[in-house]
């Protein structure tokens, strides 16, 4: 899940507790086991006549959104 605790991420990387999976978008993976902490995420799909919109949100944060055009058959 996204974090706003950038100092904590820097410390984890420095101590070798995480590894960088991707630089764009920046993603890390923990090198140790954790408890089952989960967060509810809502996936919203809006189907229009010419566009389809999607959004992933939680109660506090928007994770991402996108839009696609529907072509003619």
Image (cartoon, grey):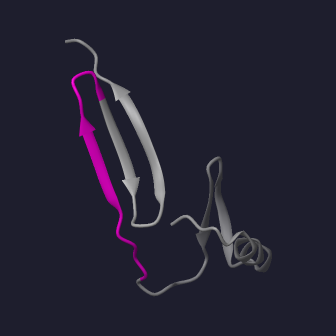
| Magenta span | 37-51
Residue 5: image location, x then y, percent: 67, 72
Q: Residue at x 45, y 87 (%)?
A: 35
Question: In terms of depth relative to the viewer, which is nearer, 63 or 23?
Answer: 63
In the image as oriented, which residue stretches furthest toward the bottom?
Answer: 35
In the image as oriented, which residue stretches furthest toward the right?
Answer: 14
Q: Residue at x 36, y 63 (%)?
A: 41
Q: Residue at x 36, y 29 (%)?
A: 68
Left-right relation of 11 to 59: right
In the image as oriented, which residue stretches furthest toward the front?
Answer: 60
Left-right relation of 17 to 71: right
- Relative to residue 71, is residue 40 depicted above or below? below
- Relative to residue 39, is residue 2 depicted above or below? above
Within the magenta stretch, is there residue 46? yes
Q: Residue at x 55, y 64 (%)?
A: 2
The answer to which quarter of the image holds residue 21 is: bottom right
Split into 4 quadrants, where in the image is the C terminus? top left
- Relative to residue 22, is residue 61 depicted above or below? below
Within the magenta stretch, is there residue 44? yes
Residue 44: image location, x then y, percent: 29, 49
Residue 48: image location, x then y, percent: 23, 29
Left-right relation of 5 to 10: left
Residue 64: image location, x then y, percent: 47, 49
């Amino acid at each position: 899940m996204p974090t706003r605790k950038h100092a904590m991420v820097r410390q984890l990387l420095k101590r070798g507790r995480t590894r960088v999976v991707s630089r764009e978008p920046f993603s890390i993976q923990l090198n140790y086991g954790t408890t089952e902490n989960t967060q509810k995420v809502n996936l919203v799909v809006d189907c229009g006549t010419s566009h389809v919109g999607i959004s992933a949100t939680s109660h506090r944060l928007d994770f991402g959104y996108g839009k696609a055009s529907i072509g003619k058959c």
